[in-house]
Each structure stands twice: as structure tokens, then as C-alpha cells.
Amino acid sequence: NAGVMQNPRHLVRRRGQEARLRCSPMKGHSHVYWYRQLPEEGLKFMVYLQKENIIDESGMPKERFSAEFPKEGPSILRIQQVVRGDSAAYFCASSPVLAARDYEQYFGPGTRLTVT
Amino acid sequence: AQTVTQSQPEMSVQEAETVTLSCTYDTSESDYYLFWYKQPPSRQMILVIRQEAYKQQNATENRFSVNFQKAAKSFSLKISDSQLGDAAMYFCAYSKASGTYKYIFGTGTRLKVLA
């Protein structure tokens, strides 16, 4: 059973360009979370999605950032007009069900975004 | 709002010795989960141990154990017989057992293991 997959692993963008980060959850998982880790910091929650629905985007910056999890295909985190401050590691995590007594999120390897 | 605090930015331990990493949290919830994650230089987040708040018994996983003090809102990680491979960043995380189950992470503790 393949784990959570993220691509690309490394992404370099110039200021003003768009960044698209992809996340394929584990098979059978319908809950996807995105977290951002700035250099030398912990992970911060950005957004929680289920198939075709954004459930909680309370951690998303108000502008330039968007996320989707379509019925078919991976979840996408999109950053428009990137700035240097967007340079970070972006992690995706998935989980099968929420109300499980052995609840756990499974993390992907992350995408490291560098804005030059 | 829930918060997680790790007050030790860095810790060192001699190989084969024991080290304890501290974590405190703040919540008004009665049912929640607590986690310790290890992040080696590869940046992969690896679950070390999980504790359900309703369980009185402290979780253990081989050389890793926790001291969960619910009233004090404390959740420390003890690593016994430390190995060179334990060197990494360690993050404490909290999740409500309701709603979105999103994680709230602490700022991390960098653990160095000395040979």
C-alpha cells in the first residue's frame, strides 16, 4: 500500500510565478490536510479538504493561495504570484476516517518550495 | 484556542543514555489526541507515539514512552537507550477528537545524540 505521495519534491519558482503542489493520499483515504513548515519552525495547518469540498481553510493566507481535492486525481495546493516569504516545505497528510480511536494522519515527504 | 509549547529548542544526550523531551499544551477539550513526531534531515514526518486523552495508561513503543499528565496538560517523551539514529527534530502535536481533527504542532526540539 503506497504511502502519501507528493510531487514535485523540490520546486523552484521566480517571484511572480505560480506554484502547483500535488498530493495523492493513501488508497482509501478521503481526508486531506495541508501544512506549511517555514525554516526552523513547526508545521502550521493550512487547509482540510474532503473530496470536492473545502472543509476548513482557516490557516490559508487570504490571498494567492487556493486548494482543491477533485473527485478524481490528486489534491492541489496552488500559490499564485509567489513571493520570497512563500519559500517553505509544504506537507500533505491524509487519514481514512476521523472518529477512529486509533486516529492518525499519514504524512507525505513534503514539497520544498524555493522562491528566487 | 489550543496551543502546544515545546520549551527546549535543543537537547543533547549521550549514546545509550536516556533523555526526556518536554511538551505542554492548552485546551478546554476533554477528548483529544497527542502525538510525538520525529523529523530527520530527510524532512519525512515519522510518527513516534500516540496517546488518547481518555486513556489513563501512558503509551509506550519500544524505547519510547510518554508521561501523560492530563491535569497538568503535560506530555513528555522519554527516549531510553538513545541511538545515533534518534538524532532529529521532534515535534509534539495535538488534535481535538472532534471537528476537523487538524493537528496543532509545537515548535520542535532538536535532539543531538553524542557518540
Image: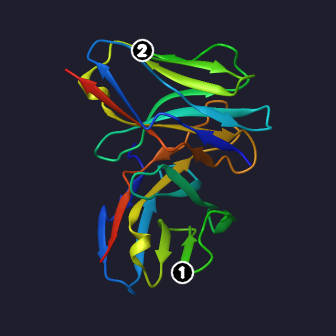
The residue at 62%/63% (across/down) is: A59
The quarter holding residue A81 reads bottom left
Q: Mark 2 — residue?
A: B62
The residue at 43%/59% (across/down) is: A38
Chain on which label 1 sits: A
Q: Mark 1 — residue?
A: A64
* Amino acid, disc 2: Asn
- Work out whether residue A100 can be spotted: no
* Amino acid, disc 1: Arg
How far from the left and from the top, in percent, is residue A4? 42, 51
Query: Going by the image, does B50 lie left or right of A41?
Result: right
Query: Do marks 2 and 1 share a chain?
Result: no
The quarter holding residue A11 reads bottom left
Q: Quadrant of the C terminus of chain B?
A: top left
Give the spatial CA distance, label 2 vs label 1.
45 Å
How far from the left and from the top, in percent, is residue A2? 38, 46
The residue at 36%/51% (across/down) is: A109
